[in-house]
Amino acid sequence: MRRAFRMHPAGVALITAATATGPVGLTASSVASVAVDPPALSFSVTRSTGSAGALLGTRTFAVHFLGEHHARLAHAFARSGEPRFTPEQNWSRLATGEPVLADAPAVLRCRALHRLPVGSSTLVIAEVLDVAIGDEAPPLLYRNHRFRRLGGDAER
């Protein structure tokens, strides 16, 4: 299964939240639309410790769809100990407290509805509360353990 999914490209997102000890965030390639009415999405995390554990303990969070110019940022949020939420990364806060990336092509503020343990992972189903659309940018993709750019259109 791992080998098969390495070949399957996925969009890259950052998921961020405010906690009592400060902002937390992680890179995710598992974000998917669940429903339009009511608006809902899903994602999974593979641990319940560190940033993932802190995020699972929050009620609300922000899901940022990334553009290809965010590859370094995606790397920083995918690795422990890398700098996060620095002024150079262009972060601010929503009125509700969640950290928000100013130049994200889209940010969806969400509230967790369900957290379902599946093996060593947790599947989160979330209601989308607000959507902010930023400047359009080519998407950042993840395939075979690498961040990638989108190529040309396929023939019909």
Image (cartoon, grey):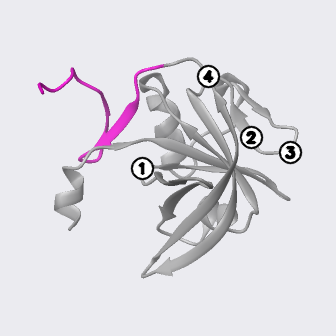
Q: Residue at x 62, y 64 (%)?
A: 50
Mark 3: give few (<14), some (14-19) or many (20+) Cα within 10 Å.
few
Mark 4: give few (<14), some (14-19) or many (20+) Cα within 10 Å.
few
- Earlier-in-chain disc, 4 versus 2: 2
Q: Secondary structure at mark 1?
A: loop
Amino acid type of disc 3?
Thr
Residue placed furthest toward the front: 37
- Earlier-in-chain disc, 3 versus 4: 3
Q: Which residues are magenta?
A: 137-156
Q: Residue at x 76, y 63 (%)?
A: 59
Given this view, does label 4 or label 2 mark the residue nearer the observer?
A: 4
Could you tell me which quadrant the C terminus lies in? Answer: top left
Could you tell me which quadrant the N terminus lies in? Answer: bottom left
Amino acid type of disc 4?
Gly
Amino acid type of disc 2?
Pro
Disc 3: which residue = 96
Cα–Cα span, label 4 and label 2: 15 Å
Disc 4: which residue = 134
Disc 1: which residue = 29
Question: Horizontal and vertical percent for residue 88?
Answer: 67, 23
| Quarter of image, res 9 | top left
- Earlier-in-chain disc, 1 versus 2: 1
Is residue 97 part of the magenta span, yes or no?
A: no
Cα–Cα span, label 3 and label 2: 9 Å
Q: Residue at x 41, y 29 (%)?
A: 139
- Earlier-in-chain disc, 4 versus 1: 1
| Observer-nearest of 40 and 66 | 40
Disc 2: which residue = 99
Q: Secondary structure at mark 2?
A: strand
